[in-house]
Amino acid sequence: MTTTSIQMRSLFQPESVAVIGASSSPGKIGYKILNNIISSGYQGKIFAVNPRGGEILGLNAFTHVSDIDSQPDVAVVAVPASRVFEVIVDCARRGVKFATVISSGFSEVGNLEEERKIVKYAREYGMRILGPNIFGHFSSVVSLNATFGPRDIPSGNVAIITQSGALGVAMIGKTSVQKIGLSTIISVGNKADLDESDLLDYLRDDPGTQAVLMYIEGIRDGGRLINSLVKTTRDKPIIVLKSGRSKKGAIAAASHTGSLAGSDDIFDAIMKQCGVLRAENIQEALNWCKYISNAPRPSGENTLIVTNGGGVGVMATDACEKFGVPLYEDKQRLSEEFSAVTHGFGSTKNPIDITGEASVGEYTSALDTALNDGKIHAVIALYCETAMMTSEELSKMVIEQNQKYQHQKKPIIFSLFGGSLTEEAVSRLIEHQVPVYTEVYESISPLGALFRFLRYGRKTEEFIREPEIDSQLIKTVIAETRKDNRQFLLAHEAQTLLRAIGLAGPNSRVVKTIGETVDAAEEIGYPVVMKVVSRDIIHKSDVGGVLLNLENPHEVMDAYQTIIHNCKSFRRNAIIDGIEIVEQVPKGTEVIIGARQDKSFGPVIMFGLGGIYVEVLKDVAFRALPVSHQEAQMMVRDIRSYTMLMGLRGEKRKDIDGIVDAILRVGAVCRQFPEITDIEINPMMVYDQGSGVKAIDVRILLSKSERNT
Ligand code: COA
């Protein structure tokens, strides 16, 4: 158990709780919270605090926290925002360990200063703050309902952490209706002090929690969150719901990496990287939580569908593909095993179709065969309502089958489709905690989520070793750029930086006069490319600052004059630092590698198909840095055009090892030098396997000040 986890215990398993702002007016939040604590069966000490004293809900109220004769572990604060600071001062001085601040009126309405003041004061006394702007928390291990939500919260093994209070309160009701028991539900509100990472540190070690559902709106310390998620998801599933999928929240940025990365794309990619399961909507999240927190852990992924309806069988096959559920394919074995339990018109291919004629006995035999078969690891049982079994027979059979195979590590999922008789059966089955759904896709999605969670847990943890880079040379390049008061590197500086990280670019020279052009071009070898080097011109091609295919001294000298002319016509006073003469490299497959400092997650890296189509195709993959070698390989495999890199139609496989190496090198510099805010290589030419990669065009931006380093 970690230190944080032990410290957090006092929040989830307090020996005493004080309600500050306890009230005898039933309409007030201070009344509801106290009432919930008393009636939830909490066995610890409860203190009510109200300046008027007297009796509240059968308790003698203290007029002041300092009058309480022992140190409360938790103080639930439900007084108006203007009074919160004085309450926090009293609580901190009295030795309260955690204050859960229900009150609204802080950073969510722009009152950040007051919120900071509260946290600062509390920290000086070692007191931690949950909230403000929360509905409270529930902890089943000590039967504590310190919320102003519903009174009865069913206990169970799912923990919910929510940033939205109202949604959290509604989820209490929803989970109750759907028979999902909670180990805790906790609202983090403005996250002024404690955030999801702190709570995960406790929940990871909590034996009563088997799955964690998180509703997130915004991320404060992405790096810390990533750490907590990675540590948790190897053992416990985390299901996340995040609002803000739309592009409006996308990060404004000066590079492709930024504009391609809606903040949601980065969030999505990083959640996958951390093994977190991201649900599309609340119902899907709840389904996953309920299923995964109770399902046995199978020894493999061979899945068999048993159905009495051909149509739903086909739909289930589609759903399995969509949710990554692999179907068992050994046709010969299936025919041997299942011929005896299928009708003449049925099928022994997966899905096993026992047809609409199947009786309850025949359905049972088919399931028995599937569940006793050692090669089959999970079973999806589909049922379409027929006149061959009654609702009672159906639910009895399902309950028995579900129970009979509980001891085997074999997940079963039932999907029953039909009218009122089937709906009745479904309700009965839910009461008996059977994993049952009425819609095929809905039933298969949780199984896919279970497999994804288990796959992540099996992934070998790789030690991350960043490649060596020449830090001294990088510092020198940055210092020179800073000296010149620039936030971007000129072409030759960027090339030096690339050399410092060990990446090859085309051979090049920067010349300052027309007289130098021919010598430089001849040293490099024809044909060459010429590009303007100017602090005033970012988009060189757009203004005629780049000329290709220059084959001889005449063309090189003409090009020099043309480029200067074009650039001066674009901006008369543009400072021209020189003209870069660059080796014209052979054509390869164009890819893009970009890395940047993300506002939420810190350094992130992107890889994708490059060149001019990058923004049209948006075929890119993201990861948080640092990445392991294995993760960098996965990134390359993640893009849709991966097959192209593997060599299409007789073409040779491209140098994927070279790409992976480049990802690691760009990642290393971005992570080790936070003042490099953006680095983007586009295009990077990738040649056939063994022939390497070449960074053709590089853009590197620096932060405003050096402070980020
Ligand atoms: N110590 C102890 N009690 C105090 C106090 C202090 N320093 N200052 C005031 N109180 C008492 C009041 O006397 C009152 O008790 P009473 O009913 O006996 O008079 C009680 O605390 C509540 O104060 P009151 O002024 O009546 O406020 P309220 O109950 O109308 O509202 C909040 C208080 C916290 C509920 C309200 O300010 C608020 O923030 N509401 C939004 C909560 C919310 O939605 N949170 C987010 C959920 S997701």
Image (cartoon, grey):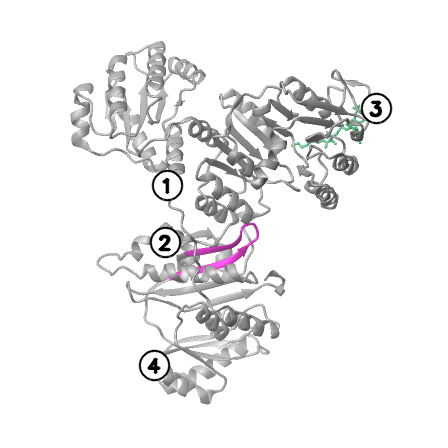
Residue 631 place in picture, x, y as percent: 40, 51
Label 1 beta carbon within 8 A of ligand 1: no
Q: Amino acid at mark 3?
A: Arg
Label 2 beta carbon within 8 A of ligand 1: no
Q: CA distance from mark 1 to mark 2?
A: 17 Å
Crowd around label 3: few <14 · some 14–19 · many ≥20 (10 Å) = few
Q: Amino acid at mark 4?
A: Tyr
Label 3 beta carbon within 8 A of ligand 1: yes
Residue 458 — which label? 1
Q: Amino acid at mark 2?
A: Gln
- Between disc 3 and disc 1, the foreground one is 1
> Which is nearer the eye, 564 or 331?
331
Q: CA distance from mark 3 to mark 2?
A: 66 Å
Relative to 421, residue 632 above or below: below
- Bounds of the magenta segment: 591-607
Tell me which secondary structure the magenta stretch mostly adopts: strand
Q: Amino acid at mark 1?
A: Arg
Q: Are marks 1 and 2 in contact (CB under 8 Å)?
A: no
> Which is nearer the eye, 599 or 418?
599
Q: Which image quadrant is residue 662 in? A: bottom left
Mark 4 residue element = loop
Residue 9 place in picture, x, y as percent: 60, 33
Residue 555 place in picture, x, y as percent: 38, 84
Residue 526 — which label? 4
Q: Quadrant of ligand 1?
A: top right
Residue 131 magenta: no
Q: Which image quadrant is residue 96 in? A: top right
